[in-house]
């Protein structure tokens, strides 16, 4: 490979990968440290006493003092930060003010419900957006089927602009009230998963399909695709063997960003469907001013987004090694 020019006899072909791994790992560590610091500062930036705010102004001062002591809020700030980081390293996120139980237990009991709709939605987005976007590009390339192109861009543009909570309400009105096929809310049988998953799927799938169409049109104009057509290769081989692999880099990157946004979108969708996940948990914690619980959920969402971004970087590097060797 031309980009693997060796500067010295001791240089190995794996050194660019080692540098890539170190850079990405360092960025992840720094980002996680910033997230932890921001989550710690959240409670201390709240005006007034968070414990008094959570328990109410009429709460017994002795109870407030005891709760502040149990949360470590009566300690010096640096010691609080050190204890906070130390507890995180041992998997402890503090105690909920309202539930009076470890935050980690609450999160571990609610996280599976969030993943049960976020992961299927993510898979469904990729299964819908990539084939639809590629098909639209193939059918409308070189200015053909202008009406089809306008219909595609119009429909996907409209669906991509619909707020997720409004889409969720519309799905309930259509398929749970007017046409009672699925449950209105809460988690029960398999049919209760359909509407929440669809509410998380439609908007990102419409947006991604538009991007995939543009990327496919770019790939179809490359020299290697013209060569494949000149060799009269079957369409199946041209699109699946030559075009699709070259879409993986952008699709993986956008897919990772979409999954991160899905986690945030679950907050709205879960509350519309009364889904017992982290989304309803954080809204309830904010309403009840349970700041340790809010802090813990924010940490989980933030860490998940950072880890997903890190995983996407690695996946893109595997799919496109040359970009990694060039020092991406």
Image: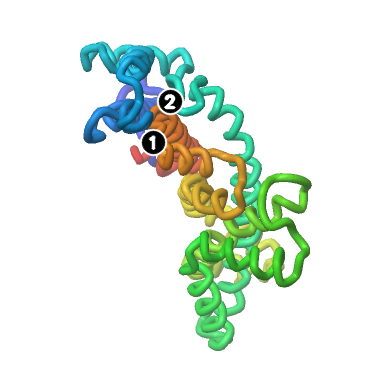
Question: Front-most of 125 and 191?
Answer: 191
Q: Is mark 2 on a helix, strand or loop?
A: loop
Residue at 42%, 18% (x, y): give it: 88
Tell me if 233 is positioned left or right of 68 in this view: right
Q: Residue at x 44, y 39 (%)?
A: 305
**Residue 167: percent from left, percent from top:** 56, 65
**Which residue is rendered at x = 63% and y = 46% of the image?**
117
Q: Which of 18 and 190 is in front in this view?
A: 190
**Residue occupying image coordinates x 54% and y 87%:** 146
Res 225 → quadrant: bottom right
Secondary structure at numbered mark 1 = loop
Q: In which quarter of the image is the C terminus?
A: top left
First in sequence, mark 1 or 2: give its number.
2
Q: Which of 119 and 313 is in front in this view?
A: 119
- Residue 197 seen in this snapshot: yes
Along the horizontal axis of the image, is 111 left or right of 2? right
Q: How many labels does the image show?
A: 2
Q: Nearer the viewer, residue 194 or 218?
A: 194
Horizontal side of 73 relative to 150 (left or right) equals: left
In the image, 74: left or right of 311?
left
> Image height check: is 323 above or below 132?
above
Which residue is labeled 2 in the image? 97
User: In the rendered image, which quarter contains the N terminus?
Assistant: top left
- Say if residue 317 shows up in the picture: no
Q: Mark 1 points at which residue?
A: 289
Characterize the local packing of mark 2: few (<14), some (14-19) or many (20 or more) Cα atoms within 10 angstroms: many
Q: Report the Cα–Cα distance between label 1 and label 2.
A: 9 Å
The percent position of residue 243, horizontal first and vertical second, equals 58, 60
Residue 296 placement (x, y as % from top left): 43, 29
Circles 1 and 2, Cβ within 8 Å, touching? The answer is yes
Q: Which colour scheme is used?
A: rainbow
In the rendered image, residue 19, in percent from the top left (x then y), is placed at: 36, 28
């Amino acid at each position: 490979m031309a980009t693997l020019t060796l500067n010295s006899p001791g240089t190995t072909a794996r050194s660019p990968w080692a540098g890539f791994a170190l850079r990405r790992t360092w960025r992840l560590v720094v980002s996680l440290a910033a997230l932890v610091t921001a989550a710690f500062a959240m409670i201390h930036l709240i005006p007034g006493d968070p414990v008094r705010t959570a328990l109410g102004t009429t709460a017994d001062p002795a109870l407030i003092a005891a709760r502040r002591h149990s949360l470590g809020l009566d300690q010096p700030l640096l010691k609080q930060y050190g204890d906070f980081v130390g507890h995180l390293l041992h998997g402890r996120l503090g105690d909920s003010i309202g539930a009076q139980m470890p935050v980690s237990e609450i999160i571990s009991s609610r996280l599976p419900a969030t993943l049960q709709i976020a992961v299927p939605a993510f898979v469904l987005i990729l299964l819908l957006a990539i084939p639809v976007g590629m098909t639209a590009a193939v059918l409308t390339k070189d200015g053909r089927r202008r009406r089809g192109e306008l219909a595609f861009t119009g429909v996907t543009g409209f669906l991509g602009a619909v707020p997720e909570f409004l889409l969720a309400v519309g799905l309930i009105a259509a398929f749970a009230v007017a046409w009672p096929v699925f449950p209105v809310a809460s988690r029960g049988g398999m049919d209760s998963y359909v509407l929440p998953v669809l509410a998380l799927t439609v908007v990102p799938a419409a947006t991604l399909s538009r991007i995939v169409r543009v990327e496919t049109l770019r790939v179809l104009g490359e020299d290697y695709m013209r060569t494949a057509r000149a060799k009269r290769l079957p369409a199946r081989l041209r699109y699946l063997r030559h075009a699709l692999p070259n879409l993986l880099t952008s699709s993986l990157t956008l897919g990772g960003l979409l999954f991160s946004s899905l986690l945030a979108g679950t907050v709205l969708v879960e509350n519309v469907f009364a889904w017992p996940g982290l989304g309803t948990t954080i809204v309830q914690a904010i309403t009840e001013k349970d700041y340790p619980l809010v802090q813990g959920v924010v940490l989980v969402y933030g860490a998940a987004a950072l880890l997903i971004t890190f995983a996407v970087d690695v996946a893109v590097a595997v799919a496109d090694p040359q970009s990694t060797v060039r020092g991406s």
